[in-house]
């Protein structure tokens, strides 16, 4: 005849089991808070690195764009003067056309950038999923 081994949890008093459960739950949620802090810090770091790179590139592109636009205005002015327009009028028309075209392109790019920076990109999906699993585990234990 074999000796029946008892489950150690069965021999422990209810108060001790409940105390252990409360301690486990407390530790679990403490670790979840640490995970949330780490994930939030990671997201902020990623976002700030992206913003820094975006700003540096933007400054360089702004200088290049200024030179390019000046060249386009000069080309447009020369073309219109060759068509017989007064140089002052040709310059004004050329500058106006370039301004409108570049303004529309810029508006489209700013709109796209704002959509990319919307709040849903900053969601902490891993932490939310982990908290959901933890809540289910606590429900099962109770």
Image (cartoon, rainbow, N blue to C red):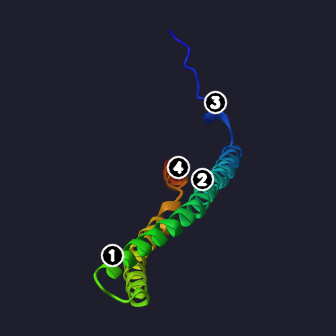
Q: In this view, does 55 lie above or below 18?
A: below
What residue appears at the point 52 percent right and 69 percent down from the top-left corner?
66
Which residue extends farthest top?
1
Residue 115 x/y as whole percent = 43, 69
Q: Give the residue pinned by disc 1.
A: 79
The image quadrant that residue 107 belongs to is bottom left
Measure how far apart labels 2 and 4 are at the Cα level.
21 Å
The mark nearer the N terminus, 4 or 3, is 3
Q: Give the residue pinned by disc 2.
A: 46
Residue 77 x/y as whole percent = 39, 79
Front of the two marks 2 and 4: 2
Question: What crowding class fits label 1: few (fewer than 14 Cα within 10 Å), some (14-19), or many (20 or more)?
Answer: some
The mark nearer the N terminus, 1 or 2, is 2
Front of the two marks 1 and 4: 1
Compared across the picture, whether 93 is left or right of 59 comes to left
Q: Give the residue pinned by disc 4.
A: 130
Measure how far apart labels 1 and 3 are at the Cα level.
94 Å
Measure how far apart labels 2 and 3 are at the Cα level.
48 Å
Which is more toward the observer, 76 or 41?
76
The kind of secondary structure element at disc 1 is helix
Question: What crowding class fits label 2: few (fewer than 14 Cα within 10 Å), some (14-19), or many (20 or more)?
Answer: few
CB atoms of marks 1 and 3 within 8 Å: no
Q: Give the residue pinned by disc 3.
A: 8
CB atoms of marks 2 and 3 within 8 Å: no
Measure how far apart labels 4 and 3 are at the Cα level.
29 Å
Compared across the picture, whether 66 is left or right of 81 comes to right
Measure how far apart labels 1 and 2 are at the Cα level.
48 Å
């Amino acid at each position: 005849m074999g000796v029946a081994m008892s489950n150690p949890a069965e021999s422990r008093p209810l108060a001790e089991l409940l105390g252990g459960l409360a301690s486990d739950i407390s530790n679990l949620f403490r670790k979840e808070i640490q995970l949330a802090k780490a994930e939030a810090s990671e997201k902020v770091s990623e976002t700030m690195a992206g913003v820094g790179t975006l700003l540096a590139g933007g400054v360089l592109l702004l200088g290049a764009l200024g030179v390019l636009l000046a060249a386009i205005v000069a080309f447009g002015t020369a073309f219109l003067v060759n068509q017989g327009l007064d140089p002052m009028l040709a310059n004004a028309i050329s500058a106006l056309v370039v301004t409108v075209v570049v303004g529309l392109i810029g508006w489209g790019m700013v709109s796209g950038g704002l959509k990319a920076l919307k709040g849903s990109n900053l969601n902490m999906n891993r932490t939310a999923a982990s908290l959901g699993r933890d809540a289910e585990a606590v429900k099962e234990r109770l």
